[in-house]
């Protein structure tokens, strides 16, 4: 396992350095539209190439599930990689973006790295060994639900559910101390693990958006599920991650409006 987390950290670091080179020259950046409100840049593609090469140099037969280039290889080890989570933020010069790498072995998440280079922040976790931010152990918050600061993301991939989402948003908003929308699910999950946010929910995410963040929260002492209380978040893209104090009530509200 040491070699796995070391490789994940190295891959994320190399990709993050490349992202920062592009971030320093945003006026020269070429941007393509994949779908409405969904963008890809040269930076995404270059970052992904670097991550894949770094992984394959050490683990040539491992499976890689990549945002921009799809599936590579196939065995019991699976790497979920997001070369640039928060692309829209990146394009606009907002520093809330990151590289996210989550590693799965035989269906169980075992290693995670979220590197946010513009914020000089690196989150890491290994199964059974805790979660860390810049080398310091982190844990989820112990605030009450009424005191909670909750993160979310708008359902731009599922606009037909917008009315239900807004009902959910309203009930959460009226129940907690505040809601934030940062534009990077990987960072929202990581900051939930750190206890900055008390919980997070979002719909229709991709597995590479959330794989690393799931392990970070669980290793920091929190709980993660889909909107029905099951562990099918990588399949559905619907996820709730929260501290143990926040999860029950956040789940109740989200399940009420968006579950089933």
Image (cartoon, helix red, strand yellow):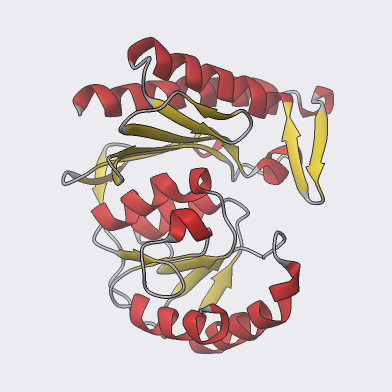
**As drawn, 15 above or below 254:** above
Please give left or right for residue 165 compared with residue 107 in the image.
Answer: right
Q: Residue at x 75, y 72 (%)?
A: 160
Q: Is residue 65 visible?
A: yes
Extreme residue in the left direction: 128
Say which of 249 and 52 sits in front. Answer: 52
Query: Which residue lies at the image location 49% right of the left edge and 20% below the top edge?
Result: 52
Q: Is residue 147 visible?
A: no
- State the image quarter where residue 39 is shown: top right
The residue positioned farthest toward the top in the image shown: 57
Horizontal side of 146 relative to 140 (left or right) equals: right
Residue located at (66% from left, 24% from top): 45
Query: On the image, which quarter does residue 60 sit in?
Result: top left
| Foreground pick, 161 / 249 | 161
- Front residue of this view, candidates 241 and 76: 76
Residue found 67% across the figure and 80% down from its top: 166
In the rendered image, residue 130, in percent from the top left (x then y), is placed at 20, 47
| Position above or below: 61 against 257 | above
The image quadrant where one finds the N terminus is top left
Residue 89 drawn at (x, y percent): 69, 45
Point out residue 198 in the picture as x, y percentages from the top left corner.
40, 69
Picture layout, residue 200 above or below residue 8: below
Residue at the outermost front position:
74
Does 121 appear above or below 54?
below
Image spot of residue 83 (x, y percent): 56, 32
């Amino acid at each position: 396992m040491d070699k796995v987390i070391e490789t994940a950290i190295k891959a994320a670091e190399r990709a993050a350095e490349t992202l920062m080179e592009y971030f320093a020259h945003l006026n020269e950046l070429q941007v393509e539209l994949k779908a409405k409100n969904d963008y890809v840049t040269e930076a995404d593609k270059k970052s992904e190439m670097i991550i894949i090469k770094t992984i394959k140099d050490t683990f040539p037969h491992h499976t890689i599930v990549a945002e921009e280039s799809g599936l590579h290889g196939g065995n019991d080890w699976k790497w979920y990689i997001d070369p640039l989570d928060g692309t829209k933020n990146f394009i606009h010069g907002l520093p809330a973006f990151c590289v996210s790498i989550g590693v799965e072995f035989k269906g169980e998440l075992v290693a995670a790295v979220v590197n946010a280079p513009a914020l000089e922040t690196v989150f890491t976790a290994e199964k059974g060994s805790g979660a860390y931010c810049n080398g310091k152990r982190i844990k989820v918050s112990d605030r009450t639900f009424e005191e909670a600061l909750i993160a979310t993301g708008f359902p731009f991939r599922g606009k037909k559910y917008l009315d239900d989402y807004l009902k959910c948003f309203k009930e959460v908003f009226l129940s907690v101390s505040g809601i934030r929308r940062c534009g990077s699910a990987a960072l929202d999950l990581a900051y939930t693990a750190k206890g900055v946010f008390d919980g997070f929910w979002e719909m229709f995410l991709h597995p590479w958006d959330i794989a690393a963040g799931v392990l970070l929260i669980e290793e920091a002492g929190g709980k993660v599920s889909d909107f029905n209380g099951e562990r099918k978040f990588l399949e559905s893209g619907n996820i709730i991650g929260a501290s143990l104090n926040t999860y029950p009530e956040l789940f109740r509200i989200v399940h009420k409006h968006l579950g089933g």
